Amino acid sequence: MAPYDNKDKLMDHVQASEDFNRARNRELLSRIQYFMNTDKNRLLSFNVVKQILKPKTESYRGMQIVPLSLIVGSEGRYRDFNKYFLPRSEYLRTRWERVDRAHLGDIILPPIQLYEIGGAYFVRDGNHRVSVARSQGMETIDAEVTSLSSEIAITPGMTADELRERVIKYEKEIFYEKTNFGELTGDFDLDFTTIGRYDVIYNHILVHKYYLNQQSAGELPFSEALVSWYQKVYRPITDIIKQEGLYLNFPGNSPSDLYVWIVKHWDFLKKKYGVHYSIADAARDFSVKYGKNRSKFLRFFAVFLDRLFNRKAG
């Protein structure tokens, strides 16, 4: 192999500069493409994903050959690169070009370090090496991998919001399967916009079961407690939410979301004003204090249409 002389180094400097310019131009085009939906152009934050998935275990997997297309995020540099690991700022040039020159000069760099969760990978160390490798058209990269447990799969191109939606859907499936909720109540629309709410509902049913057991000679089956909670607690509250159009003050949230918040607010108000404070008053108080202001006319009109169409459907 011919010696790597000063002329070669100069050429590599020029080539690395051109490579970075090309990568930056591609990033700018990508930014324009996703101008109306910037989340689709972002790398995932590993810490945000951990908060969403809440992995219970972690294990060292050692050295692996990892497809670059499955590296979807970063632990600390997720703002510096877009979802294709193209550099998003000029200040990355110096280090990026240094890595690129090493690649052009066939200098072997240490393997990158990755976290794996849900079948996808996140850079712990080596973001610039991933960026250069992808820009050079490489398909795989050597990596030292640490794996975290997850029952939810992450697919390339997924946003954090889409991941939350997938987790909520999974939680709903588990809750309905575990409790037989749909068959017992005929309600398949217990929907939430926040992770962890089905566990809250399960605990509400258990608390309701506890109080029912205090009035019963024997142990009440969970299924009976669930139906009782649904008919005597959940439905009356969500009926108030729908009949009075309170959900209109909380766009983007479901009646089930409001149920959880209102029950918590009701508990606070009962401690403050006494146990006879009504749930209807608690719902209205919560809407006034925390909802977005909507005109009474718009709320009345929306409720009128809702009742009209429901009557026709029936």
Image: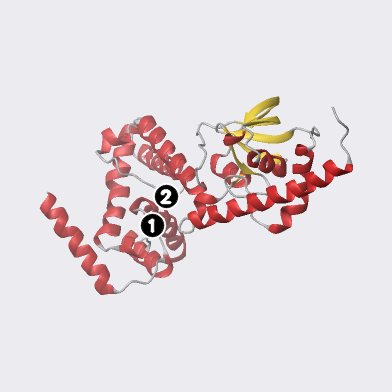
The structure residue drawn at horizontal position 79% and vertical position 33%, both measured from the top left corner, is 106
Amino acid type of disc 1? Gly
Relative image position of residue 208 (x, y in whole percent) = 38, 42
Q: Which residue is mark 2?
A: 193
Label 2 or label 1, whichever comes before in sequence order: 2
Q: In the picture shown, does residue 102 fall above or below 295?
A: above
Q: Position of residue 180 (x, y in %)?
A: 32, 31
The residue closer to the viewer here, 250 or 136, is: 136
What element does badge 2 sit on? loop
Does the CB distance between marks 2 and 1 fall below 8 Å? yes
Q: Which residue is mark 1?
A: 252
Left/right of residue 32 with respect to residue 24 in the rendered view: left
Q: Amino acid at mark 2?
A: Thr
Residue 72 drawn at (x, y percent): 58, 40
**What crowding class fits label 2: few (fewer than 14 Cα within 10 Å), some (14-19), or many (20 or more)?**
some
> Which percent across, then down, holds residue 144?
72, 30
The structure residue drawn at horizontal position 56% and vertical position 31%, both measured from the top left corner, is 119
Which picture quadrant has residue 138? top right
Quarter of the image that includes the N terminus: top right
Q: Secondary structure at mark 1?
A: loop
